Image (spheres, rainbow, N blue to C red):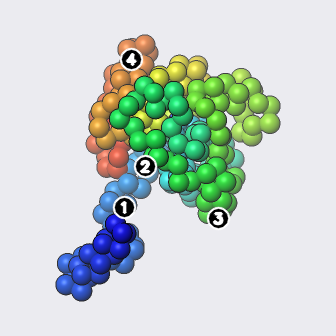
């Protein structure tokens, strides 16, 4: 019913020339991609891969994978996207009563993998299904993981978009020893919450300041490892 009402509403707006209804680029999508591109520019020459904590539908993996490919850096930069690919796990829902259990349940691991394959990004993006932070420990010791020798990972960017304090904090603690000099930890968080709390604590631990992102897109704050 809701869909029919929205459809009629959209058709009326189109007839009255109030709203552009073609699907194409718009300011929001351009801003989103440019924000990511500018972030990439900061780590382009920093050794190491991109770790994504919370991959969802694979939107960010698609963008970073494409940028890697366009920069001819496929041989030494890779996106590793972590997620359950079935929505927030129970422990995360239990400690974040405001989260919607139905959020991020629309796309399975296979859907997101297909998205990467259809965009010819299977050499740039690897998806890792499982519960964070445990899935990281498994990934670090997996001798079949392409791109690094077990125990010798290098990271140039951690993109945090899992929305949960414990997940972000515990994942960062595991990944800390692999961060390259010049690497960045960036938050995709509109409303300050668990991820920001985790980054504040991490910045205290590393004794590094948190910076506010000012270059477009959806990134709120970041930390640069010096
Ligand atoms: C906001 S979405 C990520 C959106 C994504 N960055 C994109 O580009 O579309 C948050 C994701 O974090 C995942 N997530 C949250 N906590 C997790 C945990 N402990 N382990 C694995 N995945 C988790 C959820 O499954 C969800 O897909």
Q: Residues within 10 Å of mark 4 (few under 14, many from 20)?
A: few
Q: Position of residue 35 (x, y in %)?
A: 37, 50
Question: At numbered mark 1, what does the secondary structure look like: helix, strand or loop?
Answer: helix
Mark 1 or mark 3: which is in front?
A: 3
**Mark 2 and mark 3 in contact (Cβ < 8 Å)?**
no
Does residue 201 appear to the left or right of 58 in the view shown? left
CA separation, marks 3 and 4?
39 Å
Q: Position of residue 157 (x, y in %)?
A: 51, 36
Quadrant position of the N terminus in the picture: bottom left
Question: At numbered mark 3, what does the secondary structure look like: helix, strand or loop?
Answer: helix
Who's the residue at 71% across and 23% down the image?
151
CA separation, marks 1 and 4?
32 Å
The residue at which mark 1 appears reads as: 30
The residue at which mark 2 appears reads as: 36
CA separation, marks 4 and 2?
24 Å
From what the image shows, is residue 217 above or below residue 15? Answer: above
Question: Of label 1 and label 4, which has the lower sequence position?
Answer: 1
Mark 1 or mark 4: which is in front?
A: 4
Q: Residues within 10 Å of mark 2 (few under 14, many from 20)?
A: some
Q: In the rendered image, which quarter is residue 81 located in?
A: top right
């Amino acid at each position: 019913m809701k869909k029919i009402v929205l459809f009629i509403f959209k058709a009326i707006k189109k007839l009255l020339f109030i709203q552009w209804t073609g699907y194409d680029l718009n300011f929001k999508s351009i801003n989103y991609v440019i924000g990511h591109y500018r972030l990439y520019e900061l780590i382009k020459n920093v050794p190491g891969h991109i770790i994504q904590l919370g991959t969802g539908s694979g939107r960010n993996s698609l963008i970073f994978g494409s940028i890697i490919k366009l920069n001819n850096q496929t041989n030494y930069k890779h996106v590793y996207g972590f997620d359950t690919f079935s929505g927030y796990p129970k422990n995360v829902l239990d400690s974040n009563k405001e989260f919607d259990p139905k959020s991020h349940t629309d796309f399975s691991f296979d859907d997101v993998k297909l998205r990467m394959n259809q965009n010819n990004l299977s050499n740039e993006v690897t998806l890792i299904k499982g519960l964070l932070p445990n899935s990281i420990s498994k990934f670090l010791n997996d001798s079949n993981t392409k791109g690094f020798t077990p125990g010798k990972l290098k990271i140039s960017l951690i993109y945090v978009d899992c929305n949960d304090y414990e997940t972000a904090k515990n994942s960062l603690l595991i990944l800390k020893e692999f961060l390259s000099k010049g690497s960045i930890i960036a938050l995709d968080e509109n409303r300050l919450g668990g991820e920001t709390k985790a980054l504040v604590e991490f910045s205290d631990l590393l004794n590094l300041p948190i910076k506010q992102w000012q270059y477009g897109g959806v990134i709120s704050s970041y930390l640069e490892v010096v």
